[in-house]
C-alpha cells in the first residue's frame, strides 16, 4: 500500500499530527530522519495523565514516564514554531512546574488559540490576557487573580469545578470576553454579585442558573440549564430553538409550560427527569397533575418538532405531560421517551405497558413518530 501521508508537504503533515495526542506524535520520530525532525514543528501540546487506569504498583513509574514525555517535548520542540493548541489533563497529580508550562503556552511567540486544562493547581493570571485565545476550557483549577481580563478573540469558554478565591467575582472574568459564542458555566465556587455585561454574540449556553442572571443568555439559540428558578420571567428568549432543562417535582411540569410561553420559536425540547423522594413515607406516591392551563404555549402549537423525556418512569405526571405535548404539538415529528438503564427498576413488561399507554394517546401531528428507548 502506498504511503500517501509521507508524500504530503511538511505543513500538511504537521497539521494532521496536531489532532493526535503528543505522546503518539513524538513516537513518530522513529519512522525516518524526516519524521525525527517533523514532530518538533507540530503546533499542538496534548498530554493526558490519569493514574486510575494504572495498577497501584506502576503508578510511580507511569507518572515518571509522563513527566519525562512532557519535559522532552518542551525541550526538543522547535520554539520558533507557534504552539496553537495546549491541552493538559493531569488527574490527582500536580507536576512541580505546571504553572511554568502554562505560562510558556500563553506567552511570547506561542500564540496559543486553544487552551484546555484539567488539573488541581492555581491558574496563572496571564491566561486571562492572552489575546490570541479562541477556546478556553478550565476544569478543577483555582483562580486567585482576575482583576484584568482581555480575551478579544475568545469564542468558546467552558468553566467547570472552578474555584474563585474570596472577593473574586465571576462578572469580572466575563467582562473581557464580549465575543463569546459558546459558554458553559457549571459547578463553580465563586461570588456572582457584580454587574454582568451583555454577551451579544452568544449562541449556545450551558449554565447553572444561580451563577448567572438569565438576562445575559436571553438571546441564545441553544440553552442547557439545570433549572429555571425565576418563575416570573420578565423577558422572552426570542432566538431560542433548543432547550434542555430538569424536572425534579411533579408540580414542575406547570413551571415548564410557563417557561415555554417565553420561548416563542422553540423547536427542540429535552427534559431530564431527576426526582428524589424527600419523604420516605411517601415513597412511590404519585401526585396527580390537574389539567394544564390555557392557552397552550405558541411554540408547542406552531414550532415544536422534537421532544425528549429522559429517565421517564411512567408516573402519572410524566405521562400527562407527554400526552399534553402529543395532543397539542401540530408539527411534532419525534416524541422520544428514554427510560434509562435503571429507571425505577422497571421490568420489561412494565416498559411495554408504558409504551402501549403512550401509543394510545391522540397525536395532533400526523407525522409524529413515538420512539421508546
Image (cartoon, rainbow, N blue to C red):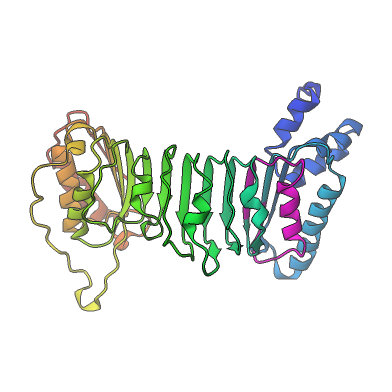
Identify which residue is drawn at 21% across, 37% down: 299
Query: How many labels sit on residues?
Result: 0
Residue toward you, 104 or 320 = 104
Using residue 93 as the reference point, say whether residue 154 is left or right of it. left
The answer to whether any part of residue 116 appears in the image is: no
First to last magenta residue range:
88-117
Residue 200 higher or lower than 75, as above or below: above
Residue 185 horizontal side relative to residue 341, left or right:
right
Does the image show residue 229?
A: yes
Q: Nearer the viewer, residue 313 or 112?
A: 112
Question: Can you give x and y, in whole percent of width and height, for residue 102 in the image?
Answer: 71, 53
Q: Quadrant of the N terminus?
A: top right
Residue 291 screen position, x and y as percent:
8, 52
Return the residue nearer the eye: 368 or 351: 368
Residue at 80 percent across and 64 percent down: it is 61
The image quadrant that residue 201 belongs to is top left
Answer left or right for 288 relative to 148.
Answer: left
| Residue pictured at 52% horizontal, 50% vertical | 158
Q: Along the line of sight, which residue is nearer the eye, 54 or 21?
A: 21
The extreme right residue here reads: 33
Quarter of the image for residue 65 reads: bottom right
Instruction: Check the image and report above or below for 201 versus 54.
Output: above
Q: Position of residue 189 (x, y in %)?
A: 49, 66
Is residue 109 within the magenta segment?
Answer: yes
Instruction: Indicate yes or no whether the magenta region holds residue 310.
Output: no
Horizontal side of 283 relative to 43 (left or right) equals left
* Residue shown at 76% from the left, 37% from the top: 82
In the image, residue 23 sits, relative to residue 8, either above or below, namely: below
Amino acid at each position: 500500500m502506498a504511503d500517501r501521508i509521507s508524500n504530503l508537504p511538511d505543513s500538511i503533515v504537521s497539521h494532521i499530527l496536531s489532532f493526535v495526542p503528543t505522546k503518539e506524535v513524538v513516537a513518530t520520530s522513529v519512522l525516518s530522519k524526516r519524521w525525527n525532525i517533523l514532530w518538533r514543528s507540530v503546533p499542538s501540546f496534548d498530554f493526558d495523565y490519569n493514574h486510575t487506569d494504572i495498577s497501584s504498583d506502576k503508578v510511580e513509574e507511569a507518572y515518571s514516564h509522563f513527566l519525562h514525555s512532557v519535559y522532552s517535548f518542551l525541550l526538543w520542540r522547535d520554539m520558533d514554531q507557534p504552539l496553537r493548541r495546549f491541552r493538559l489533563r493531569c488527574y490527582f497529580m500536580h507536576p512541580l512546574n505546571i504553572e511554568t508550562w502554562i505560562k510558556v503556552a500563553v506567552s511570547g511567540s506561542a500564540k496559543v488559540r486553544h487552551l484546555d486544562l484539567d488539573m488541581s493547581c492555581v491558574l496563572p493570571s496571564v491566561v486571562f490576557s492572552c489575546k490570541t485565545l479562541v477556546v478556553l476550557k478550565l476544569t478543577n483549577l483555582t483562580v486567585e487573580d482576575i482583576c484584568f481580563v482581555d480575551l478579544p478573540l475568545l469564542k468558546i469558554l467552558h468553566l467547570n469545578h472552578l474555584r474563585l478565591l474570596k472577593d473574586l467575582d465571576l462578572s469580572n472574568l466575563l467582562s473581557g470576553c464580549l465575543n463569546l459564542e459558546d459558554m458553559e458555566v457549571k459547578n463553580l465556587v465563586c461570588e456572582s454579585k457584580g454587574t454582568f455585561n451583555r454577551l451579544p454574540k452568544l449562541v449556545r449556553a450551558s449554565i447553572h442558573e444561580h451563577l448567572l442572571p438569565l438576562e445575559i443568555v436571553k438571546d441564545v439559540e441553544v440553552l442547557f440549564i439545570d433549572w429555571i428558578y425565576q418563575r416570573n420571567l420578565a423577558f422572552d428568549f426570542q432566538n431560542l430553538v433548543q432547550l434542555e432543562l430538569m424536572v425534579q417535582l411533579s408540580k414542575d411540569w406547570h413551571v415548564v409550560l410557563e417557561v415555554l410561553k417565553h420561548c416563542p420559536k422553540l423547536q427542540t425540547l429535552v427534559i431530564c427527569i431527576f426526582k428524589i423522594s424527600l419523604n420516605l413515607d411517601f415513597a412511590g406516591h404519585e401526585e396527580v397533575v390537574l389539567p394544564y392551563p390555557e392557552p397552550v404555549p405558541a411554540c408547542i402549537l406552531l414550532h415544536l418538532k422534537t421532544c425528549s423525556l429522559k429517565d421517564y418512569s411512567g408516573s402519572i405526571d410524566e405521562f400527562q405531560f407527554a400526552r399534553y405535548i402529543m395532543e397539542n404539538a401540530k408539527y411534532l415529528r419525534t416524541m422520544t421517551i428514554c427510560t434509562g438503564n435503571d429507571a425505577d427498576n422497571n421490568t420489561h413488561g412494565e416498559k411495554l405497558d408504558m409504551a402501549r399507554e403512550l401509543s394510545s394517546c391522540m397525536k395532533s401531528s400526523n407525522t409524529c413518530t413515538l420512539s421508546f428507548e
